[in-house]
């Protein structure tokens, strides 16, 4: 049995004030759930959020990290620093990092290696653009992104992390993949990992992300290969995020 996981990716949103209210509400709402819940605030709020979730069931994650270990890399944040701040998880290869900041498969793979070395659990994001889906290239793109990471860290490495399937056309658009569309790609991802190691594939949690809301989460999470969600916009609203965590549990 894979424990469901719901991670909130706040992206570049929030403030000290909003974090306080949001986390109080979420902590109160998820009590007793079987779902593992993670919040990923911007770097500058990690310390504050870490304090706010202390003693709750919520875990801390970051949205990105440097591929280098330490040193003269102005503006970058090392995985070891995230670990030092109490992060368990780090999101890597989000489509916004890939498209807006030029992170290619090699960079994402290198960051995954670094994250594991720094004792973090990577949430590796994969997903196709709309034109790639329309051209029938979803499996080609997702397979390429997945294999880049698998080749770098092996099945044993990926076993310590999580994969998030986020079709780029569904992110922030309100255009969710149907449960069937998502399931098809999740099954493809699991089969891809099984080529490296069947037991690892069976135990691996694969999250869906892209316009997940309180009212569509249940249908998605009801699919056999969807083990939870990576949530953007709805993770900033207590009621929505709690409803999604409940739907996963
Ligand atoms: P939305 O839930 O806002 O579509 O964002 C999804 C996402 O990118 C999470 O990482």
Image: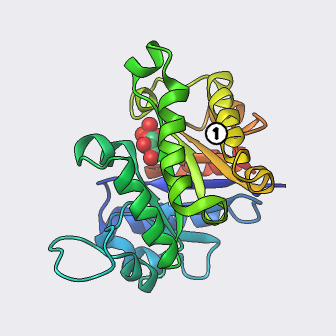
Ligand 1 within 8 Å of the CB at mark 1: no
The crowd level at tag 1 (other Cα within 10 Å; few <14, some 14-19, many 20+) is many
**241, 127: nearer the viewer:** 127
Quadrant containing the N terminus is bottom right
Residue 69 lies, with reference to residue 181, above or below; the image says: below
Residue 62 falls left or right of residue 218: left
Residue 181 falls left or right of residue 63: right
**Residue 234 seen:** no
Q: Position of residue 80 (x, y in %)?
A: 40, 82
**120, 176: nearer the viewer:** 120
Residue 33 lies, with reference to residue 213, above or below; the image says: below
Q: Residue at x 49, y 77 (%)?
A: 117
**Residue 249 seen:** yes
The residue lying furthest to the right in this view is 1
Helix, strand or loop at mark 1: helix
Residue 60 lies, with reference to residue 106, above or below; the image says: below
Residue 147 lies, with reference to residue 66, above or below; the image says: above
Q: Residue at x 32, y 58 (%)?
A: 14
**158, 100: nearer the viewer:** 158
Q: Position of residue 36 (x, y in %)?
A: 67, 62
Q: Dividing the image into four equal quarters, which quarter contains ligand 1?
A: top left
Q: Position of residue 194 (x, y in %)?
A: 73, 46
- Reading the image, the residue beneath label 1 is 189
């Amino acid at each position: 049995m894979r424990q469901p996981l719901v991670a909130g990716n706040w992206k570049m949103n929030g403030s000290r004030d909003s974090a306080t209210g949001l986390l109080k509400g979420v902590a109160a709402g998820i009590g007793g759930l079987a779902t593992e819940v993670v919040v990923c605030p911007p770097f500058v709020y990690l310390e504050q959020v870490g304090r706010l979730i202390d003693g709750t069931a919520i875990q801390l994650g970051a949205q990105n990290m440097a591929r280098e270990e330490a040193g003269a890399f102005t503006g970058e944040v090392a995985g070891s620093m995230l670990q030092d701040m109490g992060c368990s998880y780090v999101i890597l290869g989000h489509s916004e990092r890939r498209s807006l900041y030029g992170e290619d498969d090699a960079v994402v793979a290198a960051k995954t290696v670094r994250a594991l070395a720094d004792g973090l659990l990577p949430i590796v994001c994969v997903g196709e653009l709309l034109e790639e889906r329309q051209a029938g290239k979803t499996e080609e793109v997702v397979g390429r992104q997945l294999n880049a990471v698998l080749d770098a860290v092996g099945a044993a490495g990926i076993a310590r992390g999580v994969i998030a399937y986020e079709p780029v056309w569904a992110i922030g658009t309100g255009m969710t993949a149907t449960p069937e569309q998502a399931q098809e790609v999740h099954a493809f991802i699991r089969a891809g990992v099984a080529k490296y190691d069947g037991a690892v594939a069976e135990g691996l949690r694969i999250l869906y992300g892209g316009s997940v809301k309180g009212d569509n989460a249940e249908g998605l999470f009801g699919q056999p290969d969807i083990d939870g969600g990576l949530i953007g916009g709805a993770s900033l609203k207590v009621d929505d995020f709690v409803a999604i965590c409940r739907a996963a549990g």
